[in-house]
Amino acid sequence: QTEAEILQHAQSFLEMAEERLMEADDEVEGMRMSSRALMDFLCEDDISFKLEEACKIFHLFCHRFQRAVQENEERELKEQKRLERQREMVEKRRSLAVCTGLDLGLSLAREPQCQEDKDELERLLEKNLSYTWSRRSLRSFDS
């Protein structure tokens, strides 16, 4: 290659490099302005403020915040599942108690007032049963 060709390639490279360097300088100046604005917002002084340190702190905060949100959602989901299981267990117990006739006894045995109700219920059932037997015995005499 001739010296003119090398100079032409170098010239185009230098122009492109200069343009990119100016863009980089603009970006650096923008970062300085943003850093200064952040420093003013956080009431930090020029000497002790380090942008890299502030960015690490914000990154760590965001990471921990997102993790806390996720943990809260998981905890809430577990609590909902636990409550659903508890409701199902209560429903199963209630169903079993109704099927076995324990529901009345359990509910009546819980409070003293209910014990009186239970005694009254037993008296009524016995009275009804004895009335039924006496009616049957009358029928047998009629036959």
Image: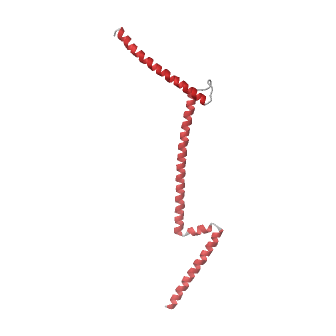
Residue 46 position in % (x across, y down):
61, 24
Looking at the rendering, which quadrant does residue 15 occupy? Answer: top left
Residue 8 position in % (x across, y down):
37, 12
132 w.r.t. 48: above or below? below
- At 49% from the left and 22% from the top, the residue drawn is 26
Looking at the rendering, which quadrant does residue 9 occupy? Answer: top left
134 w.r.t. 57: above or below? below
Residue placed furthest toward the right: 112
Q: Nearer the viewer, residue 58 or 35?
A: 35
- At 60% from the left and 28% from the top, the residue drawn is 40
Residue placed furthest toward the top: 3
- At 40% from the left and 13% from the top, the residue drawn is 11
Image side of residue 2 versus residue 65, left or right:
left
- At 55% from the left and 47% from the top, the residue drawn is 75
Residue 2 position in % (x across, y down):
34, 9
Residue 49 position in % (x across, y down):
60, 26
Q: Nearer the viewer, residue 40 or 64?
A: 40
